[in-house]
Image (spheres, rainbow, N blue to C red):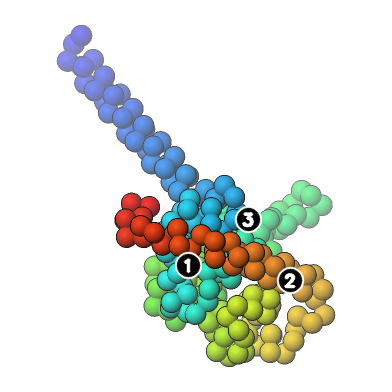
């Protein structure tokens, strides 16, 4: 084989190696952002993604919002899909009209609200498809409701209504004639209670070996 052919073979081999590396990276990224296997059991979710447990606990310490409430919000908003968006709207099922809102990510935060969060929390590099940032956003937003509307931190029902309507809208009772929203809020509250019961049964196990699991996952 001549020198030219050797160079071509080397280039091809190098390209193949780079392609394999990129494929591996993409696979790892997809695995790390995949929803948990059982989104109805918070113990199993935290065991699968231990960093989610740590992030939720940090939210509780920083903003006063308990993990079972935070996780119930994420379940309702995105089913733990990091890049979730509202579906496209269509005219006559043919012409795309765009999405119904700018909501994106685990917490389905709107563009403007997310930008406000970045400024007020000084978390400038926060991303809506990053779980740690998303739960911190939920904690920050609910903390505003706790302060302004004097809602109990465990009252997922009221917190969700304010999350949807805003603190001002919640104070004015704009949710009262929205039967569909009241139904969703009850659903969130019920799931939060379920998550709370589950956490009581597994918190000791989650805390066991916390130091090593926080390092190695």
Q: Is residue 183 visible?
A: yes
Q: How many numbered circles are shown?
A: 3
The spot of residue 51 in percent (x, y) is: 42, 58
Counting residues from the N terminus, which is met first, the one under dot 2 or under dot 1? Answer: 1
Give the residue pinned by disc 3. 40
Q: Is residue 154 left or right of residue 26?
A: right
Image: 82 above or below 147: above
Name, please, the residue furthest toward the left: 3
The spot of residue 27 in percent (x, y) is: 44, 40
On residue 71, the disc is: none
Give the residue pinned by disc 1. 56
Counting residues from the N terminus, which is met first, the one under dot 2 or under dot 3? Answer: 3
Local SS, label 2? helix
Proximity of marks 1 and 3: CB atoms separated by less than 8 Å: no
Q: Nearer the viewer, residue 47 or 94?
A: 47
Counting residues from the N terminus, which is met first, the one under dot 1 or under dot 3? Answer: 3
State which quadrant residue 183 falls in.
bottom right
For disc 2, the neighbor class at 10 Å (few under 14, some 14 to 19, many from 20) is: some
Proximity of marks 2 and 1: CB atoms separated by less than 8 Å: no
Local SS, label 1? helix
Local SS, label 3? loop
Q: CA distance from mark 1 to mark 3?
A: 16 Å
Q: Is residue 115 visible?
A: no
Q: CA distance from mark 2 to mark 3?
A: 16 Å
Give the residue pinned by disc 2. 186
- Residue at 69 percent across and 85 percent down: it is 170
- Residue at 57 percent across and 85 percent down: it is 146
Q: Nearer the viewer, residue 24 or 143?
A: 143
Image: 129 above or below 164: above
């Amino acid at each position: 084989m001549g020198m030219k052919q050797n160079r071509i073979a080397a280039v091809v081999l190098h390209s193949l190696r780079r392609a394999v590396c990129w494929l591996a990276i993409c696979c790892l990224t997809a695995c790390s952002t995949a929803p948990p296997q059982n989104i109805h059991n918070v113990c199993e979710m935290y065991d699968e993604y231990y960093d989610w447990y740590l992030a939720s606990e940090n939210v509780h310490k920083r903003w006063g919002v308990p993990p079972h409430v935070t996780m119930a919000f994420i379940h309702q908003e995105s089913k733990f899909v990091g890049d979730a968006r509202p579906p496209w709207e269509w005219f006559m099922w043919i012409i795309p009209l765009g999405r119904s809102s700018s909501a994106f990510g685990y917490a389905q935060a709107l563009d403007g609200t997310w930008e406000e969060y970045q400024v007020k929390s000084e978390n400038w590099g926060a991303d809506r498809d990053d779980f740690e940032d998303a739960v911190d956003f939920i904690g920050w937003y609910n903390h505003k409701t706790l302060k302004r509307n004097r809602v109990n931190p465990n009252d997922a029902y009221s917190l969700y209504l304010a999350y949807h309507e805003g603190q001002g809208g919640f104070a004015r009772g704009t949710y009262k004639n929205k039967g569909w929203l009241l139904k969703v809020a009850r659903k969130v509250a019920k799931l939060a209670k379920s998550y709370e019961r589950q956490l009581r049964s597994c918190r000791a196990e989650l805390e066991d070996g916390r130091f090593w699991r926080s390092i190695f996952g």
